[in-house]
Image: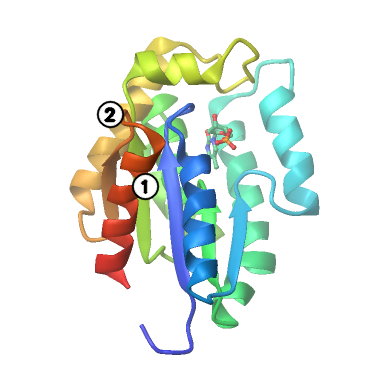
Amino acid sequence: MTEKKGLFITFEGGDGCGKTTQLNLVAKYFREKGKVVLVTREPGSIGLGQKLRELILHYDEDIAPTAEAFLFLADRAQHVCKLIKPAIEQGKVVLCDRHTDSSVAYQGYGRGENIEQIKNFNNIATQGLIPDLTLVFDVSEDIAQKRLGKEKDRMESAGRNFHKRVREGYLEIAKQEPQRVRVIDANLPIEDVFEQVKKIINEKI
Ligand code: TMP
């Protein structure tokens, strides 16, 4: 990585894994070091994405798995083009709550869409952009369920077996790309999880 280029870190994991809390701690950590940080998320970062998020998560009729995959990809294409790429080019640290691996884990492993095709579509949506680091927050099903509470959106209420496949999918992604993807034990208290995160980030930068 050259001096001028920013850093792109993605935060991944099943619903209720605690990644958003950790992302905010990482943002504070980088800001204290004087870095300019962009905190963003998928789906739903900017205008079009916010509309897509509402549609995907709260649409009350059945959505075909392939259509669901393309809705997330449409959000990603807009997000990368309009927000992520420009921020990285400006040298910012971009922290993104979910990105390409969510499509592979949820639509690929979870819904059963063709994984290689999802990866190819991801590549089109991101114009080939790959995160410098991806943190996968791995948490047991019981803890995830407790963290989610009772009000669940369309994806969160997809069932235990679906979420089990998503979790296994993430672990498989990490196995296949150990250089980029690191698994964090997110069953622990927030501070202990953050210690693991800091260690990995400091190794990487
Ligand atoms: P969030 O609640 O972490 O913001 O994520 C929104 C939901 O959308 C979550 O259940 C995961 C799901 N999702 C996918 O299924 N595929 C994707 O590509 C993305 C970005 C999210």
Q: Is residue 53 left or right of residue 204?
A: right
Vertical order, 105 against 89 (above or below): above
Amino acid type for the residue under numbered disc 1: Phe
Q: Is residue 164 left or right of residue 19?
A: left
- Quadrant of residue 115 in the image? top left
The foreground one among 86 and 61 is 86
- The quadrant of the picture showing ligand 1 is top right
Q: Which residue is under mark 2?
A: 168
- Which amino acid is tagged 2? Glu
x, y percentage for residue 79?
65, 58
Question: Looking at this view, is 55 or 119 the one in front?
Answer: 55
State how far apart marks 2 and 1 are (Cα): 23 Å
Residue named by callout 1: 194
Please indicate, yes or no, whether residue 128 appears anywhere in the rendered image: no
Residue at 45% in and 72% down: 7
* Residue in the picture at 69% in, 45% down: 44
Q: Label 2's element?
A: helix
